[in-house]
Image (cartoon, helix red, strand yellow):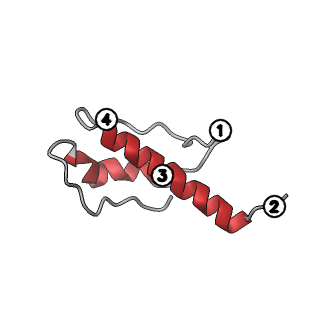
Amino acid sequence: IERVQVLVYRESRGWEVKSPAFTAQYAGARLESGQKLDRQIDGISGATLSVRALNRLARLALLFDRHITKGDQP
């Protein structure tokens, strides 16, 4: 992952996920075996669901990248 940016955030709590200090944690992230991120992302108190959603999106983006760049090889 090169960069993560939250374009729109409409919830009343957890807006900190938009901050560069939080999103910078994803820079350089890769997938380990088991399709997990290769690093622990620090959570934000009161924004558990938002952090989980960003983690899922980061993993999904990396899975798409893997699929597109390597293709489905038997």
Labelled pair 2, 3 in contact (Cβ < 8 Å): no
- Where, by quadrant of the figure, is residue 6 drawn? bottom left
Left or right, 57 with reference to 45: right
Residue nearest the viewer, comparing 24 with 72: 72
Position in image of residue 53 (x %, y %)? 39, 45
Quadrant of the snapshot with the C terminus = bottom right
Q: Are marks 2 and 4 in contact (CB under 8 Å)?
A: no
Give the number of the disc on residue 58. 3
Alpha-carbon span between mark 3 and mark 1:
14 Å
Q: Residue at x 28, y 36 (%)?
A: 44
Under circle 1, the secondary element is loop
Give the amino acid at mark 2.
Gln
Residue 48 numbered mark, or none: 4
Q: CA distance from mark 3 to mark 4?
A: 15 Å
User: What is the three-letter code of the residue carrying label 3?
Assistant: Ala
Determine crowd level at label 3: few under 14, some 14-19, many 20+ residues with C-alpha closer than 10 A.
many
Q: Which residue is denoted by mark 1 in the rendering? A: 34
Q: Quadrant of residue 52?
A: top left
Of the numbered discs 3 and 4, the one sitting upstream in the chain is 4
**Res. 73 mark:** 2
The tag earlier along the polypeptide, 2 or 4, is 4
Q: Position of residue 34 (x, y in %)?
A: 65, 38
Mark 1: which amino acid?
Gly
Q: Secondary structure at mark 2?
A: loop
